[in-house]
Image: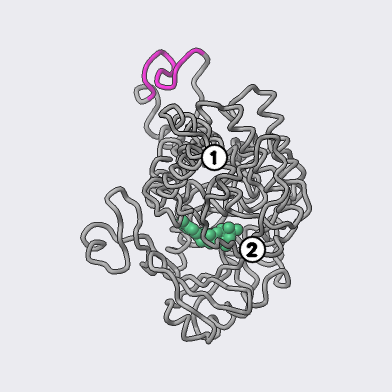
Amino acid sequence: PVSHGKPGRAKQQKQQALNNNKNRARTNLGGSFGSPSSFRSSDPPPAALLHTFSLHDARIRSNHAVIIPYAVETGCRSRRQRSVHGSSANQGLLPSTPRCPPGSTSTAYGAGRPLHQTVHPMLKKLFKSFRSPLRRAPRPRSTPEVLSSSQHPLKRNEISRHAISVVERLQKAGYQAYLVGGCVRDLLLDIDPKDFDVATSATPEQVRAEFRNARVIGRRFKLVHVHFGREIIEVATFRANHPQGEEEENSNQAARHESGRILRDNVYGTLEDDAQRRDFTINALYYDPTQEHILDYARGMHDVRNHLVRLIGDPEQRYLEDPVRMLRAVRFAAKLDFDIEKHSAAPIRRLAPMLRDIPSARLFDEVLKLFLAGYAEYTFDLLIEHDLFAQLFPASGEALKRNPEYTEKLIRQALINTDDRIHDGKSVTPAFLFAALLWPALPARVLQLQSKGMPPIPAMQEAAHELIAEQCQRIAV
Ligand code: ATP
Ligand code: MG
């Protein structure tokens, strides 16, 4: 009901989203979360809910509002132009699958006979090899494309000296080590990285042995935090895909739910393995600050240039392994103003209910990353578009169906407000965010209780209590 309105409205919303989220100066989020003071909605502020919340002291390490440099490398293109370009990427380079003549169907080609009866097998093979790369998942590469310092814009001096010192120290100790993930991707797009992640051939114990200031953390995904004052460099050992069947069952390192969801992900591997098990192609670029090379195993540079969020491997399988990747796809699409490549987008609506199986504490972290990074309003649109919002906030999803205008207006205003505060360097609080997201579900509950004879104030308190209790089942507020 939100983003599928009239075309004029959708366009206006998109423009509004771009104005709110994209064309602003980069601002660091200063300070800790304080109390919200400037909720400007004409609707009543969700004070009752806010009051009823008992929130953990949630903190995000750091956040950046993001400016997207439209003019980087690919030239100044609008979002619309880019999506056209994105969806037809490479069509000029590679011939696409042969088209049927007008009036015929894809299976009836020529004289009404199926393709396999009219086209020589050799030709079929040829056509197959010419298929547009968008029709299939990128092939795993065992040798990377190597970009030397003159072929990419990354500069050593843009990178945290602590991150470089971690990489150099590990390399000197004889291990492979690279900067990887969001920091490489963001630097390529001229965005200040949120944090610096290192991937290495050293095991967590070997990494810890190299640094006095290091701690091994995590169980599902073991990694090492190397502390430098307030800065933490996250060091992960190269992972491989999971062994199948019995081998996996007998392993302490790997565990998989019968749905395919990965429960424990500590199977170590080579650099090549590590590249294939990362989520998106744009997140699988490795930078070696010593040689100043970028290694690209998954055509990530191609997707950075074409502004596409594309899963590595078979999208359905990758979402089944970890449904949170659906939220990450939306998060990166909103943050970078990229399109989700169509095969990566296609299964999301169908698989969205898989989010129910994700531990509520992990979803809480993800929701904060989605909504407290300076582009919440646009993220909300994308979550609605991909049927993910109601999975995170079931009661608010119901309210959107029942009373779309009121619900959307209230949530959107709260998110615009949150984005504005972040862009202005003001503090934001998860309590306000959750209160605002849940508020629209409250009136119907209150009325329901009142209709059973409960007086208004107790009905309000009871309804708020019920809503929060239900929400906590999904997200550990
Ligand atoms: P940012 O830090 O800006 O939010 P990021 O891409 O660095 O973005 P992180 O959550 O810090 O995201 O993860 C670091 C890297 O680890 C990612 O870039 C990706 O390569 C890999 N990664 C993280 N989560 C997953 C996941 N669920 N599945 C596969 N790979 C993942
Ligand atoms: Mg990161």
Q: Which residue is mark 2?
A: 62
Label 2 – label 1 distance at C-alpha:
23 Å
In the shown orientation, is residue 73 left or right of residue 246? right
In the shown orientation, is residue 352 left or right of residue 235? left
* Residue 259 shows up from this direction: yes
**Is residue 295 found inside the magenta-colored segment of the image?**
no
Q: Which residue is mark 1?
A: 383
Q: Pick whichever, 3 or 191, lies toward us.
A: 3
Q: Pick whichever, 313 or 355, lies toward us.
A: 355
Q: Which residues are magenta?
A: 103-115
Amino acid identity at mark 1: Leu
Label 2's element?
A: loop
In the shown orientation, is residue 363 left or right of residue 440? left
- The vertical placement of 79 against 24, above or below, is above
Which residue corresponds to the image point at 56% horizontal and 68% vertical from the top-left? 197
Residue 428: x and y in percent read 66, 55
Residue 403: x and y in percent read 55, 26
In the shown orientation, is residue 30 left or right of residue 281? right
* Residue 145 shows up from this direction: no
**Is residue 114 found inside the magenta-colored segment of the image?**
yes
